[in-house]
Amino acid sequence: MKLIKYLIPGILFGIVMTKSEAISWFRIQEMFRFESIHMYGIIGTAVILGAILVAILKKTGAKTMYGDFMKFTPKPNQIKANLIGGTVFGLGWALTGACPGPMFTLIGHGVLSMFLVIASAVLGAFVYGLLRPRLPH
Amino acid sequence: MIDFISQPWHWAVSGVMIVFVMFILHWFGNRFGVSSNLNTICAMGGAGKNIEYFNFDWKEKRWNLVFIFGAIIGGYIAINFLASPEPVQISEATRAHFESLGVHTPRTLSEGNGYVPAEIFATANIFSLKNLIMLVLGGFLVGFGARYAGGCTSGHAISGLSNLQLPSLISVIGFFIGGLFMAWIVLPQILTL
């Protein structure tokens, strides 16, 4: 149960990604070409609502189902890594039209070429780990 | 009910549902971040033996693998049982741009559902130079960049910005620098290879 229950938010996430069309290659292109409000609406709504929710959860000391405080870990301050890594990520996002969540969801759609994309993404993460000591952070 | 869910969702509904997914993960005692799984897969494969970055107990991250396995199932359910009655309503400007570059944008379901262009992603088409660049290089850049930046759309753009994290804002600015450069300058060149 401890692990299996993660299928529930996972399945929901796959449905949301599909019905929101956030996994559409064309939607991502529209976003970067500023030709539709769709993706900005999704991310904007999620961030505004998410910020309100996280603020409330922190302020009220919300607990997990196990009774511990919910974790909201700060992201490490690595300006160069954020900017350079983010830019590299953006280059890939506009090519594949898919960030990691959608890559997996599209497997469920039967887009089997996504296996190749995911394998390449794993290789990319591996090469980052390999080069990490030599990269600016 | 099924018909109601099967319509394409308004972006505001989608945004709310993403936050709901994030909330469930926090209620379970974890967090929302898909690209960490790439590290977990590397660690499972034994990359931690020689590379410090992957030297962590991947078994503690299994929950996230279950989560993305769920996302695959969710994608299967949504496309098979909750499919929209029409393809993705791509904007006319985007249609005109890609049609001029030889990428067809479906208007009816018989032409496609508008999720991924068949010219690039259909299994029969992946072994062309153009498509291998898009899939292999694209995937590589996503994986490398996400881990370098410390997160992807879920970890930085949604969770990080919701938690008012400056590193996440800088990363998202990076996502757009790279994405705009690719979409406006490089992609048209690749598509006409």
Image (cartoon, coloured by chain):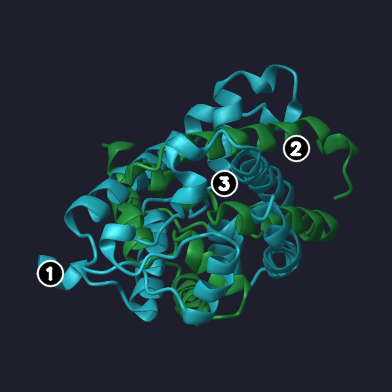
Chain colours: A green, B cyan
Q: Position of residue A64 (x, y in %)?
A: 37, 56
Say if residue B159 shows up in the picture: yes
Q: Position of residue B103 (x, y in %)?
A: 52, 59
Given the image, on which type of amino acid does mark 3 rest?
Ser
Given the image, on which type of amino acid does mark 2 rest?
Tyr
Crowd tier of the residue under label 1, counting other residues whose Cα lies within 10 Å: few below 14, some 14–19, many 20 or above: few
Q: Which mark is residue B100?
A: none
**Cα–Cα gap, marks 2 and 3:** 13 Å
Crowd tier of the residue under label 2, counting other residues whose Cα lies within 10 Å: few below 14, some 14–19, many 20 or above: many
Q: Nearer the viewer, residue A15 or B51?
A: A15
Task: Say how many tags the image has.
Answer: 3
Given the image, on which type of amino acid does mark 1 rest?
Asp
Where the N terminus of chain B falls, by quadrant? bottom left
Query: Which residue corresponds to mark 1?
Result: B3
Q: Are marks 1 and 3 on the same chain?
A: yes
Q: Which mark is residue A128?
A: 2
Q: Secondary structure at mark 1?
A: helix
Q: Are marks 1 and 2 on the same chain?
A: no
Seen at 68% across and 45% down, the residue is B147
Q: Position of residue B114 (x, y in %)?
A: 39, 62
Q: Secondary structure at mark 3?
A: loop
Query: Which residue corresponds to mark 3?
Result: B35
Quarter occupied by residue B171: bottom right
**Cα–Cα gap, marks 1 and 3:** 33 Å
Q: Nearer the viewer, residue B156 or B113?
A: B113
Say if residue A72 shows up in the picture: no
